[in-house]
Amino acid sequence: MSSGSSSISAPPVGLGNQPVLEVTDLAVRFTRRGEADTRAVDGVSFSVAPGETIGLVGESGCGKSVTSLAVMGLLPKRNVQVSGSVRLDGQELVGADAETLRGLRGADMAMVFQDPLSSLNPTVPIGTQVTEVLLEHRDMTRKEAVDEAARLLDRVGIPDPLRRLKEYPHQLSGGMRQRALIAMALSCSPRLLIADEPTTALDVTIQAQILELLRELVVDSGTALVMITHDLGVVAGLCDRVHVMYAGKIIETADRHELFARPRQPYTGGLLASVPRLDSPRGAPLTPIRGSARDTIAWADGCAFAPRCDSAQDDCLTEVAGSTVELVPDGPRRELRCRHPIEYPPAPAGATAPGAAR
């Protein structure tokens, strides 16, 4: 599997410290009169320490972006029910008032959105949109804010930044708009950064630069980074720990090396098997996951992935003894939601353990 950046060999800076972000049993339900509720996020829990990068991975529609919007407090108030707990440095965000959230966004937590064209105001110059973050959260004069905005645009690889500050979003390419969003998110060196597919519109060269920039931010500033992506190459090159989501739940979580070496959830194995590999024979067919994300059942009735799973058995499609398919420990630093996980033969005596440093 290829990646636009090299892997991280050093341990995360902040592991073992008090988490920057703690998400506990987060649930998001969309309601609509006359229709059944849609549970987009269903009991998600994870934490991120200073200097740690975690990945939220899964197909479109699995709940990754809704999770991030719930953490940031950006979901609409109408017809949306959010429950559970989201704590930023110990401060509860679920149920916090709008003024509190506005004070935290941009300064202590920031987000890079997936679609830069809809995230930037088309009627306001790029420079105004970047400098307003600096003026709001940092003690700067307008001239200092303009100089800092130009430096930020240059840092993310936008040429001739002083000229670009005067231009409108439609005058920039898709890649430049995405980099401008990243510059805005980095402007106050937030404690928590959520990146929702931040390299989607970028070519491989710029992608590598942006991933390296994010890595430097994590290492130098101790920022906690949540990377939302379906690009497993990005996960392999950047994340320390990976949470795989399906139908609103985390179904497998493990350290990056362990997950790639021995995926236990058939869905995780399917994601890895469907990615082209450089070491595969020329013309070798891919092995896609059959069906689509719509082919699912309610978690209360069994495993949501069972209709698409080649390893599914009868007990995957029904409740067993009145219990649902729970997320349970599966060895050191791994959790798994599966009744019939992928099994592996025991390693030969003296062999290097999966995920060990090489």
Image (cartoon, rainbow, N blue to C red):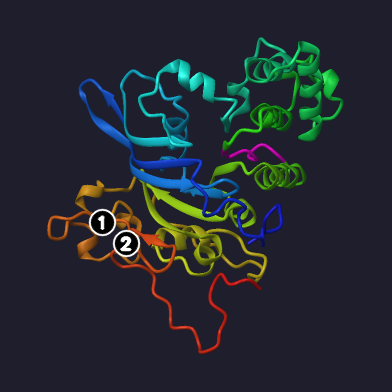
Label the magenta part by its dominant secondary structure: loop
Magenta segment includes 97: no
Spot the residue most to the left: 321
Q: Are marks 2 and 1 in contact (CB under 8 Å)?
A: yes
- Residue 114 placement: quadrant: top right
> What segment carries the magenta color?
194-202
Q: Name the residue nearer the viewer: 38 or 75.
A: 75
Magenta segment includes 196: yes
Q: Is residue 290 visible?
A: no
Query: For numbered disc 1, what is the local secondary structure?
Result: loop
**Is 303 on the left or on the right of 230, as rendered?**
left
Q: Position of residue 173 (x, y in %)?
A: 74, 27
Q: Residue at x 13, y 55 (%)?
A: 322
**Is 20 on the left or on the right of 248, as rendered?**
right
Q: Residues within 10 Å of mark 2 (few under 14, many from 20)?
A: many
Q: Position of residue 96 (x, y in %)?
A: 39, 23
Q: Amino acid at mark 1?
A: Val
What residue did someone put label 1 on? 325
Q: Is residue 186 above or below residue 330?
A: above
Q: Is residue 234 visible?
A: yes
Q: Residue at x 57, y 30 (%)?
A: 108
- Between discs 2 and 1, the one toward the N terminus: 1
What residue did someone put label 2 on? 338
Q: Is residue 148 above or below residue 67?
A: above
Q: Is residue 356 above or below residue 13?
A: below
The numbered mark at residue 63 is: none
**Is 73 on the left or on the right of 308, as rendered?**
right
**Distance between the alpha carbons at the discs numbered 2 and 1:** 7 Å
Q: Position of residue 227 (x, y in %)?
A: 56, 44
Query: For numbered disc 2, what is the local secondary structure?
Result: loop
